[in-house]
Image (tube, helix red, strand yellow):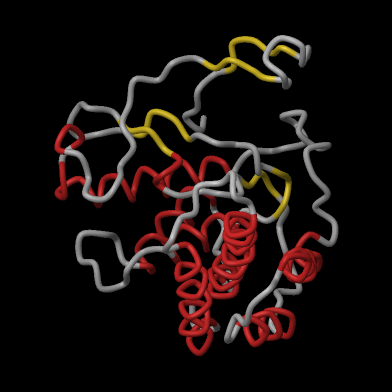
Amino acid sequence: MVPHARPVALCEDPAVTGAVFYVMEHVDGLLPLDPLPDEIGGPSAARRVAEELVDALAELASIDYTAAGLADLGKPDGFLERQVGRWRGQLESYRNRELPGCDQVAEWLERNRPTVTVPGVMHGDYNRHNALFSREKPTQLLAVLDWENATIGDPLMDLGYLVGSWDPGDSSLPGRAEAVARWTERTGRRPEYLGWYAVMSKFKLACMLEGVYVRQQSDPTRVATGYLGDVVLGLIDEALRLVPAASDW
């Protein structure tokens, strides 16, 4: 089972707080932020954290979503075909500046889109900032958080997002091949075209964050995050750097 905070109660009456809301159980854990907290092991726990995240992701990808009653959570048919157009269209609805390389990345993604996909449950924002770890050593993943983007789509989107965010030069983390082998051993599925998914994840995140950046700049009631615009440009640059070798993943 994928570790998560169990729901306790749902309130569908917006008169209570102004919106529909739910209450989930308290999980006494820590976010594995950078640098890793000493309470979960500090820098020496980096590999453990990465492996726990890969293992939980494999569990998620292995769920029979039909048997679990989740068939109506998303529309897996044509999922990959919709991705670039959806995020590109969203970006164009608020784009107000040049984003060098963005269109080049989008065009590459369209030309190289995988033709076969295996649908499954995907988290949609799977990274270590959405996970709680225990204070015991060796630390354990206690709960994956923030499921609002979960859907029935392609689980390789999550894997590409996770592995594509790792620094390949960081010796404290499993190498890409090692992480993929671990995921494969637990799912029985060998991922193909994973480089495409890594590029897609960076493109998607760039489109999303550009929307946040534009809203911050145009709304005086929002607190602007000064570096966010540069983060978007950095994500596009990272995607461009991945493209030449993406087919070898």
Above or below: residue 84 compared with residue 158: below
108 or 35, nearer to the observer: 35
Residue positioned 72% across, 29% down in the render:
68
Q: Does 86 sit left or right of 217 as displayed?
A: right
Q: How many marks?
A: 0
Q: Find residue 132 and report its horizontal and vertical position in percent.
A: 37, 33
Q: Does 38 sit left or right of 79 as displayed?
A: left
30 or 80, nearer to the observer: 30
Which residue in the rendered view is the most extreme toward the front? 220
228 or 234, nearer to the observer: 228
Residue positioned 71% across, 77% down in the render:
113
Above or below: residue 114 compared with residue 125: below
Query: To which quarter of the image does residue 151 belong?
Result: top right
Q: Find residue 183 and report its horizontal and vertical position in percent.
A: 46, 54
Q: Find residue 67 and report its horizontal and vertical position in percent.
A: 75, 31
Residue positioned 48% across, 80% down in the render:
237
Above or below: residue 195 compared with residue 184: below
Residue positioned 46% across, 67% down in the render:
231
Q: Does 161 sit left or right of 104 as displayed?
A: left
Q: Find residue 102 and report its horizontal and vertical position in percent.
A: 62, 81
Above or below: residue 166 compared with residue 56: below
208 or 176, nearer to the observer: 208
